[in-house]
């Protein structure tokens, strides 16, 4: 069953066409990696999925909700779609617990005691059960990334969007485990080695299009287009 479906999506910034007819499907439980050169439109695709970008053509559907329909409640949608940005942006002045429970509390009205239990549960999932009262600054970068992932998980997302997270340490294993456990993910990354480990499918973007896609191992080993071949030889050397 498909969870995400983009059909002929057009996105322009002024005269510049950033997405030039993007069509893609992500099935439930799949981890899809999106790769491609800087400016290819990778982040824009994720932002469209989450309704952060108005589009000029086509449709974006997440779990049968038409994201680009003006009547769609994007707040509601974002409760089911977690997004982990490159910078992770934890709040430095808030404890790990507060970082994790803020959204469940504000968006879903989860009361404090239940929220703390929820924080404990998601911290166990990411291997940081003892850090609930710590502040982000005292954690390693990898641990901060795990907290950011835990924060997304606290909203029980159906879909996780990760924009070039440059994961370090344990955070890589956490993401691999999530993928294995059947979390649906769209991961933008330039780390091809990690793509091989974590992704079921690869989409290569070029000039605002999905230029080539297929099963991860085959697509990375035997690219069918010269553009992907060139891209891979540039990033692998
Ligand atoms: N707000 C904006 N105004 C004008 N152009 C924009 C805007 N946001 C993005 N773009 C352009 O859209 C194109 C695609 O951007 P996008 O951020 O999706 O690329 P990307 O594939 O994620 O690149 P990178 O690997 O560098 O993150 C780029 O050419 C970028 O300059
Ligand atoms: Mg980007």
Image (cartoon, helix red, strand yellow):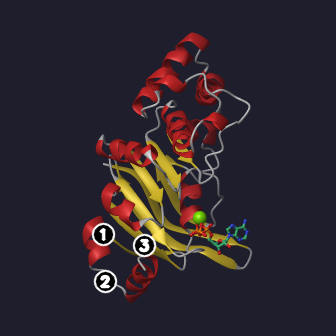
Can see residue 183? no
Residue 224 numbered tag: 2
Element marked by disc 1: strand
Residue 133 image position (x, y, % from top left): 60, 22
Can see residue 26? yes
Residue 89 image position (x, y, % from top left): 66, 44
Q: Are marks 2 and 1 in contact (CB under 8 Å)?
A: yes
Residue 126 image position (x, y, % from top left): 43, 34
Badge 1 or badge 3: first in the primary sequence: 3
Q: Are marks 1 and 3 in contact (CB under 8 Å)?
A: no
Element marked by disc 2: loop
Q: Is residue 17 above or below residue 225?
A: above
Q: Is residue 105 above or below residue 192?
A: above
Residue 214 numbered tag: 1
- Name the residue that disc number 3 marks: 204
Horizontal side of 26 relative to 47 (left or right) equals left
């Amino acid at each position: 069953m498909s969870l995400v479906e983009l059909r002929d999506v057009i996105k322009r910034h002024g005269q510049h066409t950033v997405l030039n007819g993007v069509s893609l499907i992500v099935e439930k439980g799949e981890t899809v990696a999106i790769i491609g050169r800087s400016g290819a439109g990778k982040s824009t695709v994720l932002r469209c999925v989450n309704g952060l970008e108005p589009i000029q053509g086509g449709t974006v559907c997440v779990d049968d909700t038409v994201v680009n329909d003006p009547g769609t409640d994007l707040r509601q949608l974002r409760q089911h779609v977690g997004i982990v940005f490159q910078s992770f942006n934890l709040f430095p002045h808030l404890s790990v617990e507060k970082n994790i429970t803020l959204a469940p509390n504000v968006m879903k009205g989860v009361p404090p005691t239940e929220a703390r239990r929820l924080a404990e549960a998601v911290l166990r999932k990411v291997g940081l059960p003892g850090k609930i009262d710590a502040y982000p600054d005292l954690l390693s970068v990898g641990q901060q990334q795990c907290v950011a992932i835990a924060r997304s998980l606290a909203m029980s997302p159906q879909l996780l969007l990760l924009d070039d997270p440059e994961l370090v340490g344990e955070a890589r294993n956490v993401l691999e485990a999530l993928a294995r456990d059947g979390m649906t993910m769209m991961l933008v990354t330039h780390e091809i080695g990690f793509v091989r480990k974590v992704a079921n499918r690869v989409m290569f973007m070029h000039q605002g299009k999905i230029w080539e896609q297929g099963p991860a191992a085959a697509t990375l080993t035997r690219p069918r287009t010269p553009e992907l071949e060139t891209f891979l030889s540039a990033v692998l050397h």
